[in-house]
Amino acid sequence: MTEAVERTDRRGLRRQQTIEEILEVALDLMAERGVGGLALSEVARRIGVQPPSLYKYFPSLHAIYDELFARGQRAHLDAMSTAVQGVESGLAAVTKAQEAGMRWAMANLPLAQLLFWRPVPGFEPSEEAFEPSKQMVELFRTALRRAVRQGELGPGGASQEAMGIVAVAMAGVSSQYLANEPGVPWERSVYVRLLARTPEFLRAAFPPR
Amino acid sequence: MTEAVERTDRRGLRRQQTIEEILEVALDLMAERGVGGLALSEVARRIGVQPPSLYKYFPSLHAIYDELFARGQRAHLDAMSTAVQGVESGLAAVTKAQEAGMRWAMANLPLAQLLFWRPVPGFEPSEEAFEPSKQMVELFRTALRRAVRQGELGPGGASQEAMGIVAVAMAGVSSQYLANEPGVPWERSVYVRLLARTPEFLRAAFPPR
DNA sequence: GTCTATATTATGATAGAC
DNA sequence: GTCTATCATAATATAGAC
């Protein structure tokens, strides 16, 4: 997490800037070398400082990972929350959120891998860093409940199973897109197009009467 | 790939045994430390040999990864091929293959990550190592064609889009299961249960007349 | 095919001077 | 908060003796 105490003096500002710079460079590194390729020494090199100095800002390499993880979760959630604003239909909200979530993931690949694949040996995100992911579940549940209320889905349309279908569709499409269509633009992807079928499948599983 | 020339003399046998041992230990390491945690030096340590000796069997670390990748692909395909044998219904064959594929992945986690997530920086599998994955596509296409012929699915039931639905379901369920239900037994998984809905979704998308 | 020795490079982290 | 110096370790890979 970022500093608990917000400082307003110049020293605090400067410090915050350095922290941001560290995280920025860390992201670059992950993008270049893979998620596991983040190295303190290289971060130090790039921001023009000696490695020991980094320990004044983060107590360990894992602490940097954890901050990136927490920020990633928040950004991902924000993207989805923004996408559903002003959408009345429950099912449409589901699709919008799915699309926004995937778009964010594709645009923030290394971060997305850190969030969803846990590829760093020995790194376990802290409890607090997980908070946004719970809110994401709520976001989908709310949308599905609305869909049921609006008669778009029948009984069970907001059940855990329905939530599962939404999650699986998103994870599956991402996974296939990344593994099998590297470099294919979003609009052309065979897999991304499948995402739009989610409402159809939800209706098949929980038919409105 | 394994040696192109099969040797039958004792020296060749011994050599093959060493190769197997190296790959075995490599798998153990990946399971313990994460896919990126494979290290030549540790492999050497565990099989009781000095690191340079390994270069008599594999020209580089990536070569070990590549052999593991190729074998993993083959084993994954075998599991699915076996599962569909003797199944008459096309749709049932799809489900059987999906289940078998996922079961294999769960039982061979580090290998599955290597196959489907590509988490090792700088490692690109060779062309030949990809061969089985093309055969897997054929396996699914054959099953879907049969489903269409049998009237289980309507027109388009063996299209690329239908193939996509099958692939997405499998990848999505795996992904969610691994990320959100670590340690939950296969039979209890909310996500694994969703796999059985694939035929239903296929019917919804390509209704038989 | 095995070893020793070595090159080369890197890593995360700490102590302590300034 | 920065640095130098250093610890302690690790890694892949090659040369060359046996």
Image: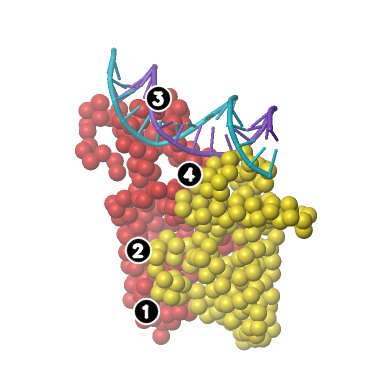
Chain colours: A red, B yellow, C cyan, D purple
Q: Secondary structure at mark 4?
A: helix
**Vertical comparison of B59 with B195: above or below:** above
Disc marking residue A36? 4
Please state which of the two labelled residues, at mark 3 or mark 1, is closer to the viewer: 3
| Camera-nearest residue between B69 and B145 | B69
Task: Give the image quarter of residue D2.
Answer: top left
- The quarter in which the N terminus of chain A is drawn is top left
| Residue highlighted by disc 3 | A50
Q: Are marks 2 and 1 on the same chain?
A: yes
Q: Are marks 3 and 4 on the same chain?
A: yes
Q: Residue at x 39, y 33 (%)?
A: A21
Few, some or many C-alpha atoms within 10 Å of disc 1 (few <14, some 14-19, many ≥20)? some
Disc marking residue A156? 1
Left or right of A102 in this view: C4: right
Please state which of the two labelled residues, at mark 3 or mark 2, is closer to the viewer: 3
Report how far apart the C-alphas of labels 3 and 1 lie in the structure.
58 Å
Q: Amino acid at mark 2?
A: Val
**Subunit bearing disc 4:** A
- Residue A81, image x, y percentages: 36, 57
**Subunit bearing disc 3:** A
Mark 2–mark 4 contact, CB under 8 Å?
no
**Subunit bearing disc 1:** A
Q: Residue at x 23, y 41 (%)?
A: A4
Q: Amino acid at mark 3?
A: Gln
Few, some or many C-alpha atoms within 10 Å of disc 4 (few <14, some 14-19, many ≥20)? many
Q: Are marks 3 and 2 on the same chain?
A: yes
